[in-house]
Image (tube, grey):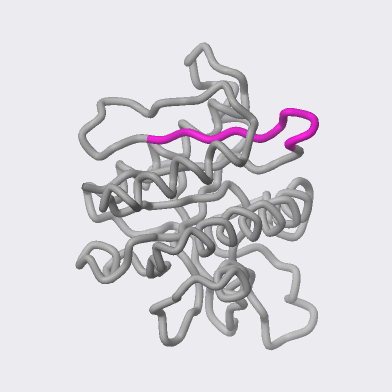
Amino acid sequence: MIVAYAVDVGSIKNENFAWARQEENQPKPKSTDSTDIEELAKSVIEDIKAKYQVALGFECPLFIPVAKKPAELLKSRHGEGSRPWSAGAGPYSMAAGLAESAWLLKRIAESGLNPRATHSRDSFSKGDAEIFLWEAFVTKKEILQDDRKLDEHFKAACIALDYFWRSYRNKRPSRIELGSGKESLSLISSVAEWAGLSLIDENPIHCEVFVPGS
């Protein structure tokens, strides 16, 4: 069975951090009232112990484009529109996400379970890895339009799960891409390797990003 998690990254101290969990047969995500990242780590570890496959997503940039032309280095990835990874909330969420994903993946690696990780949906679907690392892209507008009676951070996590399951079940591709003339730096691959997880991707390029309409 597959269990998906979505993490809305942000300050844990200021309670701007939230996560949601949803099993593949559950009709809707299960939000939590905890901003404790330790509870998240425990939940993920317990799911891996139970032999579930875990799709673990973060609402922040997990890979960045590296353009060949210097003037294009900070341009948005295809699909981001006017909200590029390098401007506005992007850099903050990226920094928060890197720190929090590093902490979380380190705890998972230290569990003794030795899970294999991938950011390839195909590899995960074939059962080649226990953890699928993915990115979500949720805008403030989508949060305000969502009518669920939840704190905005829990709501963002639930929206991210909605996008994930819709795309995963229907085998739809990601809508955020590198674009031509660019290479990629996979931040989450570096984090996973630092944490001590076994990353099965031989040539990590980028991860899938689940967005509205996916």
Q: Nearer the viewer, residue 173 or 24?
A: 24
Say if the magenta span includes residue 17: yes
> What residue do we see at 31% from left, 42% from top?
165
In the image, 128: left or right of 177? left
Q: Residue 124 occupies which quadrant of the picture?
A: bottom left
Residue found farthest to the top:
149
User: What's the magenta region?
Assistant: 12-21
Residue 67, given in percent of the width and then of the height, sits at: 67, 81
Of 102 and 119, nearer the camera is: 102
Query: How far across and how far down the image is residue 80, in percent?
Result: 59, 54
Label count reads 0
Q: Is residue 196 left or right of residue 35?
A: left
Where's residue 131, x and y in %? 38, 60
Image side of residue 38 versus residue 85, left or right: left
Q: Residue furthest front?
A: 112
Is 193 one of the magenta-colored residues? no
Residue 75 in the image: x percent, y percent?
A: 70, 67
Seen at 59% across and 26% down, the residue is 34
Q: Is residue 52 above or below residue 118?
A: above
Quadrant housing residue 181: bottom right
Q: Nearer the viewer, residue 162 or 43?
A: 43
Hey, which quadrant is residue 129 in on the image? bottom left
**Does residue 17 appear left or right of residue 199 in this picture?**
right
Q: Residue at x 66, y 63 (%)?
A: 76
Q: Residue, x 47% and y 25% (percent of image)?
A: 31
Decide: is 17 above or below 181.
above
| Secondary structure, magenta segment, majority class | loop
